[in-house]
Image (tube, rainbow, N blue to C red):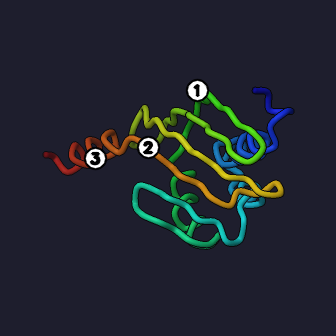
Amino acid sequence: MSEASSPALSTALAYHRAWTGHDFDRAMTYIADDIVCEAPSGRLEGAAAFRGFMEPFTHILTDSHLIAAFGDESTALVMYDTKTLPVASAPGAECLTVVDGVITHLRIIFNQAPFIAAERAADGE
C-alpha cells in the first residue's frame, strides 16, 4: 500500500522520519496528548510520559534503516533497524493507531539483547 493511500501510514512515516532525523519536537506533533504506548518497559500514558521514554533513545541514535511499512485507514506497522552509540544493530517495530492525523496508541517491540550484551561488556562481564 502506498503512503498516499493510507492516512495512518502517512502519519506513521512522518513521525518515524522526524524522530530518526533527530527532530523530536517535530515527532511529538504527531503524538496525541492522551497517547497510550505499550513499550518493552511497560505501559506509558500521556504525551509527557511518552516523551520521557522515547526522546532519550533519539540521543543515542546514529542511524536508522526502514525495513518495511504498511498501513490502512487507522493502523500502520513500521519495521526498522537502528544503529546507536552502544550497539550497531537494534531492530524494532511499531504498530501505530492513528486518529485524525495523530498517533493515539503505539506498541513498540524491539530486540533488547544487543543492549544487554553491550551493558555486560561495558561492566566487564
Q: CA distance from mark 3 to mark 1?
A: 23 Å
Picture coordinates of residue 57, whole percent (x, y) = 51, 53
Picture coordinates of residue 3, whole percent (x, y) = 80, 32
Q: Residue furthest right?
A: 4
Task: Give the residue drawn at x 52%, y 68%.
Answer: 44
Task: Give the residue drawn at x 38%, y 41%.
Answer: 111
Question: Neighbour class for label 2 at 10 Å: few (<14), some, many (≥20)?
Answer: some
Which residue is the site of mark 1?
67
Number of labels in the image equals: 3
Which of the numbered marks, if any, corresponds to residue 116?
3
Disc 3 or disc 1, which is closer to the eye? 1
Question: Neighbour class for label 1 at 10 Å: few (<14), some, many (≥20)?
Answer: few
Specify whether 31 is left or right of 112: right
Task: Give the residue drawn at x 67%, y 71%.
Answer: 34
Question: Neighbour class for label 3 at 10 Å: few (<14), some, many (≥20)?
Answer: few
Q: Give amino acid for label 1.
A: Ile
Asked if the residues shown at circle 2 and circle 3 are in contact, with their CB atoms under 8 angstroms apart, the answer is no
Specify whether 21 is left or right of 37: right
